[in-house]
Image (cartoon, helix red, strand yellow):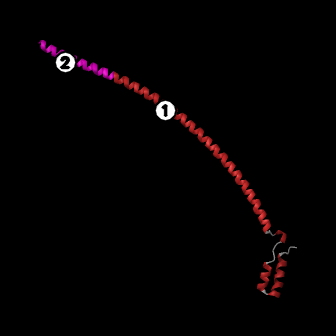
C-alpha cells in the first residue's frame, strides 16, 4: 500500500512526538516515498545492465559492418580514381612524346635548312672574294 505525501507528513509528526526530531527523520528516510514494487533491486539493475550490453554490442556490430562497407566503397572509388589518373597520365605522356618527336623533327629540318643556307652563303662569299681577287689580278 502506497502512502501519499499527507500521510507521510502525519506519520513524521507523530514520530517526532514519540522519538524526537532527529530519530523521526532517520526513520522516515528509510521509508520509500513510492510503492516498493516501483523500487529497482540489484537483480533488476543487473538484468538492465545485461540488456543494455546486448543492445550496445548489437549497435557496435552494426556500426562496424557499416564502416567496413563504407571503407570498402571508398577504397573501390579510390582505385577507380587511381586507374583514371593513370590512364590520363599515360595519354598525356604519349601526347607529350608525340609533340616532342614532332618538335625535334621540325628543329632538325630547320637546323638542316640553316646549315645549308649558311654553307651556301659562305660558298657564295668565297666565290665573290675569289672573283674580286681574280678580277683585281687581271687589271
Taking the image as shown, residue 120 lies to the left or right of residue 18, namely: left
Which residues make up the magenta segment? 113-139
Q: Identify the residue under disc 2.
A: 129
Q: Nearer the viewer, residue 86 or 6?
A: 86
Taking the image as shown, residue 113 lies to the left or right of residue 21, namely: left
Can residue 40 be found in the magenta stretch?
Answer: no
Q: Secondary structure at mark 2?
A: helix
Rendering coords of residue 72 (x, y %):
64, 44
- Sequence order check, earlier mark of 2 and 1: 1
Q: Residue furthest right?
A: 1
Residue 17 occupies quadrant = bottom right
Q: Kindly identify which numbered label has been placed on residue 120.
A: none
Can residue 124 be found in the magenta stretch?
Answer: yes
Q: Please, is residue 60 above or below residue 40 in the view?
A: above
Q: Circle 1: is it few (<14), some (14-19), or many (20+) Cα within 10 Å?
A: few
Rendering coords of residue 115 (x, y %):
31, 22
Residue 19 occupies quadrant = bottom right
Q: Identify the residue under disc 1.
A: 93
The residue located at (43%, 27%) in the rendering is: 101
Amino acid at each position: 500500500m502506497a502512502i501519499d505525501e499527507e500521510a507521510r507528513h502525519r506519520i513524521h509528526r507523530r514520530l517526532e512526538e514519540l522519538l524526537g526530531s532527529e530519530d523521526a527523520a532517520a526513520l522516515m528516510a528509510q521509508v520509500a516515498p513510492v510503492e516498493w514494487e516501483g523500487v529497482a533491486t540489484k537483480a533488476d539493475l543487473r538484468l538492465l545492465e545485461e540488456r543494455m550490453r546486448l543492445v550496445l554490442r548489437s549497435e557496435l556490430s552494426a556500426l562496424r559492418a557499416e564502416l567496413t562497407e563504407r571503407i570498402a566503397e571508398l577504397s573501390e572509388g579510390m582505385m577507380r580514381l587511381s586507374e583514371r589518373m593513370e590512364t590520363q597520365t599515360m595519354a598525356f605522356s604519349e601526347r607529350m612524346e608525340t609533340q616532342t618527336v614532332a618538335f625535334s623533327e621540325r628543329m632538325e629540318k630547320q637546323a638542316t635548312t640553316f646549315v645549308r643556307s649558311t654553307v651556301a652563303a659562305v660558298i657564295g662569299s668565297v666565290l665573290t672574294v675569289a672573283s674580286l681577287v681574280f678580277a683585281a689580278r687581271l687589271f
